[in-house]
Image: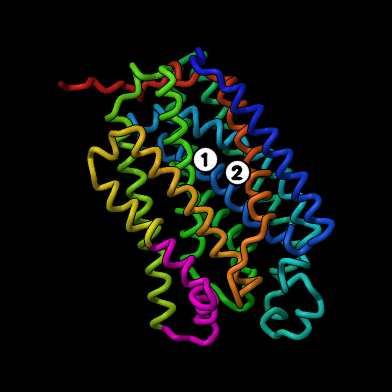
Amino acid sequence: MNPVNLQVIRSRSLWVGCIGLALCAVAGVFSREQFFRSYLVAYLFWLGVALGCLAIVMLYHLTGGRWGAVIRRLVESGMRTIPVMALLVAPLLPGIRSLYAWARPADVAADPILQHQRLYLNFPFFTIRAAIYFAAWILMASYLNRWSLEQDQTGKPELLGRFQRLSGVGLVVYGVTVTFASIDWAMSLDTGWFSTAYGVLFMIIQVLSAFAFVIPFLAWIVRHNALHDVVTPNHFHDLGNLLLTFVMLWAYISFSQFLIIWAGNLTDEIPWYLRRIQNGWEWVAILLLVFHFFAPFLLLLSRHAKRSLTVLSAISIAVMVMSVVDVFWLVMPAFIPGHVSVHWTDFAALAGVGGVWISLFTHGLETRPILPQQDPQFVPYVEST
C-alpha cells in the first residue's frame, strides 16, 4: 500500500526538469563553454545522490538495523535512477574538449605532463571507462532491486545471504569505480594535480548527499500521516546520527587532504588550493567550513534536533545545499580561478537534471510499498514513555 500520493511531486518535478533542460539547451547555443561547466557540476551532484543511495542500500544489507528499513524503499528508488543518469551523461560528451585540457591536442603537445598521461587520458579510453563504471553500477542496482522485489513476494530467508554477499563485493566495486570516475570527471580538470584522498572525498559527498535527501523526504511522508505509527522519533534519531557521522567524515578527509598538501608545499600541488582560497573563492571555502561542518555538527549533537522532524529536515536540506556548493567549489575554479562566478545556467542545470531525477525517484516510489513487506531485519521500535 502506498499511503501518500506522489503524483503531484512527480509531475511538477518533471516540468521543472524539462524547463531547466530547455534553458540549458538555449545556453548551449549562445554560451557553449558555460553550459558544459554548469551541466558538469549539476550532473556530478545528482549522479552522486543516486550512487550514494546505492552505497546506503549495500551498507544496510551488510550491517542491518532499524534505520535502514525505514529508508530502504527511498534509497532503492534512488539507485534505480542510475540507468537514466547513464543517458544524461550524453550532453557532456560533445564538450570534452571544452572541459578537459587532455582532450585538446594543442594543449597536450605543449604540456609534458599531459603527454605522459595521454595513454590513460584520451577520449576513446575515457568513454570506455565511463561505460564500465555505469555497467557495474547498473548491474549491482539491478540485482539488488530484483531480489528486493522477490523478497516482498516470497520472503525467502536465503535472500539475506545473497544481499550480503553482493553488498560486500559491491562496496569494493563501488569504491574502485567511484575513485576512478572522480579522477576522470573531476580531478583531471586540473592538469598535473592529484590526491589519493580525492575518490574517498567524493564517496563521502555522495553518501552524505543521499542521506540529506532521503531524511526530509521521509519526514514529509510521515507528516502526511503515512507512516506516523511505524516511523518513530527513534528512527530519525538514528538517521541523524548517521548524518552526523558523514558530516564528520567529510570534515576529516577534507582537512587531512588540505593539511598534507599544505605541509608538503610542493609546487605541483599547492596551486590547486591557491585557486580555491584566493580571489573570492576563500569565501566559498569559509561558507563550506561553517555550514557544511561546524553548524550541522553542533546542531546534530542535540538529541532534540535529531528527534524533531522539522529541525532534522532543515539541517538535512542545508547539508544537501552545501554539498552542491562543495561540488561547485571542487570543479569551477579549474575554469575561472581569477574570480567567483555564478551563472544562471548553474541553477538551470541543477533544476533540469534534478527535476528529471526527482521525477524518476518519485515514480520508483509509486511502484512499490513505502516499507519493505517481508524484510526480517525490520523490527519497529517500541516507544518508551
Three-letter code, disc 1: Leu
Report which residue position mark 1 lands on: 54
- Is residue 325 visible in the rendered structure shown here? yes
| Residue drawn 52% across the image and 57% down it | 325
Residue 286: mark:
none
Is 57 within the magenta?
Answer: no
Q: Secondary structure at mark 2?
A: helix
Choose top left, top right, bottom left or bottom right for residue 176: bottom right
> What x and y, as percent, mark residue 239?
35, 38
- First of labels 2, 1 by sequence position: 1
Label 2 Cα neighbours within 10 Å, binned few <14 / some 14-19 / many ≥20: many
Q: Can residue 65 be seen in this snapshot?
A: no
Residue receiving disc 2: 137
In the depicted structure, whether residue 316 falls above or below residue 159: below
Q: Is residue 272 magenta?
A: yes
Tell whether 114 sits left or right of 151.
right
Total label count? 2
Which amino acid type is shown beneath numbered disc 2? Answer: Trp
Relative to 25, 134 lies left or right: left
The residue closer to the viewer here, 313 or 62, is 313
Q: Residues within 10 Å of mark 1 (few under 14, many from 20)?
A: many
